[in-house]
Amino acid sequence: MQDVTETPFDPRRDSLLVKAARGQTTSRTPVWFMRQAGRSLPEYRAVREGTAMLEACRNPELVTEITLQPVRRHGVDAAIFFSDIVVPLAAVGVDLDIVPGTGPVVAAPFRTRADLDRLPDLTPEHVGDITKSVQMLVRELGPTPLIGFAGAPFTLASYLVEGGPSRNHEHTKALMHGDPQLWHDLCARLAQISGAFLRVQVDAGASAVQLFDSWAGALSRADYRTHVQEHSRAAFAALDGLDVPRIHFGVGTGELLTDMSEVGTDVVGVDYRVALPDAIARLGGRFAVQGNLDPALLFAPWEPLEQAVRRIVAEGRTAPGHIFNLGHGVLPSTDPDVLTRVVALVHEVSER
Ligand code: 1CP
């Protein structure tokens, strides 16, 4: 007879992703890929035809379809909400666009105190469509967990201050050091926006969140600790009281791993430049880790790629928890069949 007291499967508690993030034992290693939705998929290019990126991000039917595409195709263990780190900025009224081939471009860069007036706090009413999209998705995904995400204050500030993608972040660092008070006020505002955006996604049903501080690797430890760390902590603190695991990731952040682990995260994302055992050691074995296959290796012949996947799965076993991922996003020209094969391999070799 069936046990009537048995509780139904809840991805917020029972999924491999959530359990690995919490350092609980899992039957195998969960795997998903940063930027798994998007230009590597022909079905993505087909549905995006004729719709601008920001418009697509605000259309619940389209967001749901695009988010589901890599789950259907690759059999990954988590979906990541299809959106962009600048969506909440656009939602509060910042004049910006996502330009194909370039990325986010801000019409008037933020440089003075008066510019703060263009950055109001984010309320759930600004992003009612996001609530709707997440709710639709969670229904469609069933047992597969949805990861909500936001950009961390430093990375968002870089786009606002530079006006677009930047190699050296020179205007951002000039503001940080030239007017530290204005810098802190800007980042505090961005932490509110990011935190509220994360909370909206969790309230609507997301099972985990990732805070992307993609460009934090451009900072010295001293700058990170003095000018950035408290604001990332504040963004995560918006989730206090909500029982969802948190993932924190940045590119080129090997030197900042311990600092980035101190902001209230459960999982530390490791980029492909740092060997996983080194990252685990730097973190004192106290954190679950996510990563860290070099996305360029997906272009290599299968044999070395397979070796790298097997090595990373084995290395991940020495951490309290491991979520297999790339060390940064899927490159647009990646062959999607290779991603599917990597998922199958991770599942096969990590089975306990
Ligand atoms: O028309 C298009 O297809 C535009 C390409 C694109 C896509 C598919 C952009 C522009 N953003 C996205 C979606 C996106 N962005 C997702 C969801 C898809 C998924 O992961 O499956 C996510 C999580 C992001 C987050 C994002 N946007 C980050 C953090 C992640 C990272 O890669 O470090 C950053 C830095 C951005 C800014 C951005 N948006 C788009 C581009 C090309 C960029 C980077 C520009 C730059 O180099 O500064």
Image (tube, rainbow, N blue to C red):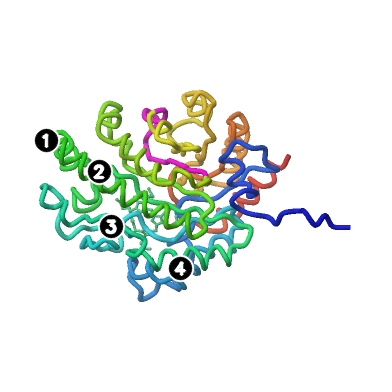
Q: Which residue is mark 1?
A: 178
Please say if 304 is above or below 146: above
Marks 2 and 4, how far apart at CA: 28 Å
Marks 3 and 4, how far apart at CA: 18 Å
Instruction: Tell me the SS state at disc 1.
Output: helix
Please say if 317 is above or below 299: above
- Image quarter for residue 58? bottom left
* Tag of residue 132: 4
* Tag of residue 89: 3
Front: mark 1 or 4: 4
Residue shown at 51% from the left, 50% from the top: 33
- Is residue 325 rendered to the left or right of residue 6? left
Marks 3 and 2, how far apart at CA: 13 Å
Q: Which residues are magenta?
A: 245-258
x, y (%) of residue 177?
15, 33
Residue shown at 68% from the left, 55% from the top: 9
Residue shown at 42% from the left, 53% from the top: 199
* Ligand 1 quarter of the rendering: bottom left
x, y (%) of residue 239?
43, 46
